[in-house]
Each structure stands twice: as C-alpha cells, then as structure tokens.
C-alpha cells in the first residue's frame, strides 16, 4: 500500500513539475539559509577560539576585556596605552609562567598588521588544537643582540595570506608604514626596508594576515621618530641604528601560558592589583563569551529572519497545494472511482507534501555542503575564517529537521480538504 502511494505521489508531483520545482527551490533556499547562518556562527566562534589556544592570560594596559582581546589577538582596533617592558620581563621570569609572548602593534604593511615579537613566538605560540606554527618557506628571524650586524634587525616572517595576496617569497624586500594606513604613496619607513626570511604555513587565524618582525627591529625603524612623527633632519641610515639602544620601552600586550592553569586566577588578581602598573589581565575564554553575548542579539535576529523565511516557504507549499486542489478534483475523483478510499487520497496528499519538503531539505544540505567546500579557501583568505564541518552544525540541523517536519504537518490541511470532497464533486461537470 505504501509503495503504491509513493508511486502515485511521485507521478502526480511529476505531472505538476513546473509549480513544484519552484516550491522545491524555495525549500532548498530556506534550508541553505537556516544552515548557512548556523555555519557562519559556528565558524566564527571556532576561528576565534582557535586563535587563542594555549594562552591562559592576555595582559595589556587597563581597558575592557573585549577590547584587549580584539586588538591583541585579532588586530581589530588599537591600544590606547602600552605595557611597560619591565612588566613583560617580570612575567617572563615568573616561575609560574611557561611562556610569555610579547606583542607590539602599531605599524602596517599594505593594510596588513605588523607584529613585533620575539623569535620564541614561533615555537611557543599555539592555535587550534594546540598546534605549533609551521614554516612553509625559509626560517624565522633572529633576536638581535649587541654585536650582531644591522641586517639581523631587518628580517620579517610573513603570514601565509600576506605572502599569497602580495605574491611575496623569501628574499623579497618590503617597506613598512607607520600606523594602520592602507594606502600610501610612499611607505613611512621606506628608508629601512625589511627582508623576508620566512613564510608561515596557513593557520586559519590572524597570524596568516600578519607581518612578524623582531621587537628590536620595530625599535630600529623608530629611532628617528618622536611622538609618532619623524624628527626633522634626523634621518638615521639603517646601517647605523645599531649604535642606539634598541631595547623596547613597552609592548602592546603579552600572551601568557602557565605551567599550572589552576593558578590563573591568582596571577590575574596579582597583575590587576599591581601598584603603579594599571594592567588588565583577561582570560581569553571569558572575554570571548562576553563578546558572543554582545553580538548575541544579531545572531538571534538572523536566526529569526531565517525561521520566518522557512515558515513562509512551508506555508507557500501548503497554499499552492490548496490552490491546485480545485484543478485536481477530477484526478482525485477518478482515483476514488477506481477503488481508492478517502484515506488513500488523504495519505496521497500528505505524502506529496512530505516528499517535496524532505527532498528539498536533502538537496539544500547537499548544495550547502558543496558551496561551503568550494568557498572555504576564499573565506579563509578574505576573512580569516575556517569553515567548520557540516557535521558540527547541530543547531542548524535540528532547525532544518523541524522545518521539514513542520512543512509535512501542514500538508494535512489540503489532505483534509481532499478527504472531505465527495466523489460526485469531481465527476459532475457542473461543479468543475
């Protein structure tokens, strides 16, 4: 009996393939929208979380936790004040600290952030599932010390996206700019170019879109600057900067990893209560939770809009079936006259609605899977987001299953109407 109903439903739907194709496209679009919003939401959260793996505390000048997280890790916004370098040295020497990675920001290269740090950054920075950074080409830069040649100061390691988008490789010369200025006729630090000595493998984090130089190198390009502007008449050649004290006075933030994470709250209190320091020490996970709460309203609005589209799509399917029911009265009456009872007709209409809904949802999942697979490299390069697997979208999957079930249930409405029609309604020409 069920096999016969499925055969009848499929043939009936095929006979009205034009109108049902539009409905199928509507269901596919609604499915992609529901799942796509959840895909974007989960991918954003995963990418943000992956960028701070292995960091137990982020230490910066006193500010809001979200602001400190955004500018120190994601290069969004700017710090109003810096952390004294002496505070970084105290952290580095603290026996409870496993790693203390300084981050100095403020310069850029053709729109990409320049990050001043130490060579240990490339060994100790962790991302994703606590993975280490890997070199795709070349080597990391050297930390400068007195007696080394000036060329050591001017070495840079590029993130994968910087190298890819600007077509750079090991050995290329680059000139940095002061501040986050995207377009400049002449780079601010053109007199002190850097040599690319390494290119990192892709990570799906802001590291991919960063240019890494040494802290001493960042000091070197600013030896003839004061208060954020060049000192008139004080153009110091690159080969002479080694005659100056290149020890940093401050850093933007410090990424701290602990030997024992159980002591994170105690160290956080110590840092924030340290006299004459005015420091903020934040837990990345807590700051991320605050960030998601801040943007939670936007998420809810997007999900609400997607749900409305899905409901309209399901109602549209029901409306079309009700409208076409009058045109199908003779078809249904013929079925009745050949032995099909009211229950058979009822089941047929319900099955047609269910077939359109579930086939549309299945095709929507396939389409989204293919599109996300094709767009993953582009999304990663443009936005630094690594799209999560479709298997991780539990919320979106539940939403589309509820959508398919809702549309199937709505199919009862035209089915009840067909069930109530009398046999003579379809066979009497005067009524058609």
Image: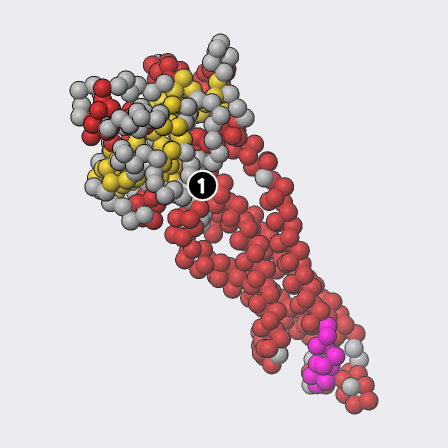
Any magenta on residue 326? yes
Query: Can residue 23 be seen in the rendering of this structure?
Result: yes
Residue at the disc numbered 1: 47
Colouring method of the image = secondary structure
At which x and y percent is residue 341?
A: 72, 78
Helix, strand or loop status at disc 1 = helix
Q: Which residue lies furthest to the bottom in this view?
A: 429
First to last magenta residue range: 322-334
Any magenta on residue 185? no
Is residue 17 shown left or right of residue 250? Answer: right
Front in this rendered view, residue 118 or 238: 238
Q: Which residue is depicted at the point 21% across and 39% down?
A: 138
Is residue 36 shown left or right of residue 83? Answer: right
Q: Tell me if residue 33 comes above or below residue 277 in the rendering.
A: below
- Quarter of the C terminus within the rendering: bottom right
Q: Tell me if residue 175 comes above or below residue 89 in the rendering.
A: below
Q: In which quarter of the image is residue 180?
A: top left
Q: In which quarter of the image is residue 17?
A: bottom right
Q: Residue furthest top?
A: 275
At which x and y percent is residue 331?
A: 69, 83
Front in this rendered view, residue 328 or 138: 138
- Quarter of the N terminus within the rendering: bottom right
Q: Which residue is depicted at the point 73% across and 72% down?
A: 322
Q: Residue furthest right?
A: 430
At which x and y percent is residue 241?
A: 24, 24
Query: Can residue 219 be seen in the rendering of this structure?
Result: no
Front in this rendered view, residue 401 or 107: 107
At which x and y percent is residue 419?
A: 75, 74
Q: Which residue is depicted at the point 39% across and 48% down?
A: 381
Q: Tell me if residue 393 comes above or below residue 78 in the rendering.
A: below
> Would you call the spot at circle 1 few (<14 residues within 10 Å), some (14-19), or many (20 or more)?
many
Q: Main secondary structure of the magenta part?
A: helix
């Amino acid at each position: 009996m069920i096999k016969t109903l499925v055969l009848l439903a499929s043939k009936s739907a095929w006979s009205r393939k034009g109108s049902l194709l539009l409905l199928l496209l509507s269901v596919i679009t609604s499915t992609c929208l529901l799942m796509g919003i959840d895909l974007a939401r989960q991918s954003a959260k995963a990418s943000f979380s992956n960028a701070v793996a292995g960091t137990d505390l982020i230490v910066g000048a006193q500010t809001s936790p979200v602001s400190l997280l955004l500018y120190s890790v994601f290069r969004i916004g700017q710090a109003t004040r810096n952390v004294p370098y002496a505070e970084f040295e105290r952290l580095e020497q603290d026996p409870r600290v496993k790693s203390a990675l300084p981050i100095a920001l403020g310069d850029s290269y053709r729109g990409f952030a320049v990050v001043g740090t130490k060579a240990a950054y490339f060994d100790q920075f962790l991302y994703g599932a606590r993975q280490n950074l890997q070199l795709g080409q070349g080597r990391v830069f050297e930390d400068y010390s007195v007696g080394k040649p000036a060329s050591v100061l001017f070495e840079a390691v590029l993130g994968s996206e910087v190298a890819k988008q600007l077509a750079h490789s090991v050995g290329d010369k680059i000139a940095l700019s002061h501040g986050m200025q995207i377009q400049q006729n002449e780079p601010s630090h053109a007199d002190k170019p850097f040599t690319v000595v390494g290119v990192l493998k892709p990570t799906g984090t802001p590291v991919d879109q960063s240019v890494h130089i040494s802290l001493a190198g960042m000091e070197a390009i600013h030896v003839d600057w004061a208060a954020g502007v060049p000192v008139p008449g004080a153009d110091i050649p690159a080969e002479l900067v080694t005659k100056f004290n290149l020890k940093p006075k401050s850093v933007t933030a410090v990424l701290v990893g602990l030997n024992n994470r159980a002591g994170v709250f105690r160290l956080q209190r110590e840092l924030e209560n340290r006299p004459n320091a005015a420091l903020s020490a934040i837990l990345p996970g807590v700051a991320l939770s605050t960030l998601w709460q801040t943007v939670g309203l936007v998420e809810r609005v997007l999900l609400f809009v997607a749900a409305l589209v899905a409901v309209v799509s399901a109602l549209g399917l029901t409306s079309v079936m009700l409208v076409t029911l009058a045109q199908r009265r003779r078809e249904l009456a013929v079925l009745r006259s050949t032995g099909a009872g009211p229950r058979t007709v009822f089941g047929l209409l319900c099955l047609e609605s269910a077939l359109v809904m579930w086939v549309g949802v299945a095709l929507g999942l396939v389409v989204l899977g293919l599109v996300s697979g094709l767009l993953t490299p582009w999304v990663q390069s443009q936005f630094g987001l690594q799209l999560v697997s479709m298997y991780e979208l539990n919320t979106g999957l539940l939403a589309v299953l509820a959508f398919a079930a809702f549309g199937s249930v709505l199919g009862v409405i035209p089915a009840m109407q067909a069930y109530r029609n009398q046999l003579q309604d379809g066979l009497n020409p005067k009524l058609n």
